[in-house]
Image (cartoon, rainbow, N blue to C red):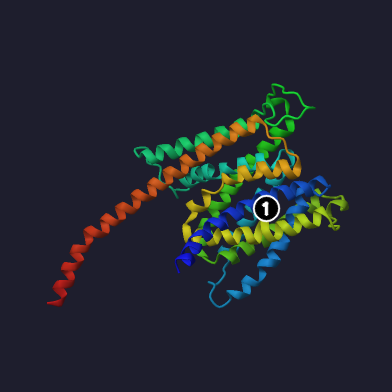
Amino acid sequence: MAMEMKMKEALPYIGMASTQFAQVGLMIVAKKAMSTGMTNFTFVFYSNTLASLILLPSFFFYRSTRPPLNFSLICGFFLLGVLGCSAQLTGYTGINYTSASFASAMLNLIPGFTFILAVIFRMEKLDCRRTSTLIKSVGTIVSIAGAFTATLYKGPQILLTSSLKPQNYLHFQETDWVIGGLYLVVDCVVSSLYLIVQASVLKKYPVELIVVFFYCFFASILSAIVSLFMDRNLNAWLLQPGTRLYAVLYSGIFGSAFQVSVMFWCIRRKGPLFVAMFHPLGIVIAAALGIIFLGDIFYLGSLVGSIIIVVGFYAVMWGKTKEDKVDEEKLARNVNSKAPLLQIKDAETKF
């Protein structure tokens, strides 16, 4: 019995660790597929189409319990598709210009940008008198500074081979790296907008799998339209057996259907903060797998920038935890202060 309880408690940790492996694996297979001539446009189209087909049964499974659909909800789903498609296209372009480890480090900007947007849309309160709010604000600035450090400064290689000599690199001369970094920053901003819209949509329609299905469905349609305009070369559409086919299968099954489902499962049991705390784990996984499978080179600028981003990220998460704890304590005090009055009223009604 005790063993079963421990296993149940460990499942969310195992689940979130697996989603980080899935996310990093998605970056690696995407870069592999694009290195064979497949563009990010067709890759996004095929992966979303496969994911929507996998999630299609959920639309019929929840037929008797799901709330009715209306035009407002369909517009919300379509907006999620627009934001999700844009995030994927810019993200895969950034990965193509840089590396999986660098892209994984940049993804830790999403909590900081989400905090800024939540304040703008009044989903988060900005009380400068609170220490936790000040720490969240400073952590957001630190995360953004870390991203610019990783983007603009490359530095020497951390792991040097005999054929490469250490040089004093300033990243301004590496055009591809800067362009890739800017694409990834746009990806983080759009992904943060996606989270804000997703929170609003889920309040109106709290059936996660169906929301994900419509998101993938609209993303596949939008990416198909973009691909028809951008990919005139038919070779980019071919899915011959090999790297491209395996990459699409992986991205559709593990990159979308599995990863999103597990994340929602963990959010329901442990909350969004628990899920967000696992993002820095992706940096370590991406660095190791990128070097092993892609031959990526890990530079000093990427390491320094990643560390700064993680420090800022945990500062934002710590501030958020403290604010939630204070709010819970206030709520408990209010309930306790009202309890005696309720008891008196109950006593009066008995007499």
Compared with 308, 224 (above or below) is: below
Classify residue 127 by image quadrant: top left
Any part of residue 137 in sight = yes
Q: Residues within 10 Å of mark 1 (few under 14, many from 20)?
A: many
Q: Residue furthest top?
A: 168
Any part of residue 94 in sight = no
Classify residue 291 by image quadrant: top right
Say which of 171 and 76 sits in front.
171
Compared with 148, 59 (above or below) is: below
Name which residue lies at 49% across and 54% down. Answer: 272
**Residue hosting label 1:** 85
Classify residue 255 by image quadrant: bottom right
Q: The N terminus lies in which quarter of the figure?
A: bottom left
Say which of 92 and 291 sits in front.
291
Q: Amino acid at mark 1?
A: Cys
The percent coordinates of residue 120 (x first, y second) are: 48, 44
Say which of 42 and 323 sits in front.
323
Say which of 219 and 293 sits in front.
293
Name which residue lies at 15% across and 72% down. Answer: 347
Q: The C terminus lies in which quarter of the figure?
A: bottom left
Q: Secondary structure at mark 1?
A: helix
Name which residue lies at 49% across and 64% down. Answer: 8
The percent coordinates of residue 307 (x first, y second) are: 56, 35
Name which residue lies at 51% across and 63% down. Answer: 7
Give the number of callouts: 1
Q: Is residue 56 left or right of residue 202?
A: right
Compared with 323, 143 (above or below) is: above
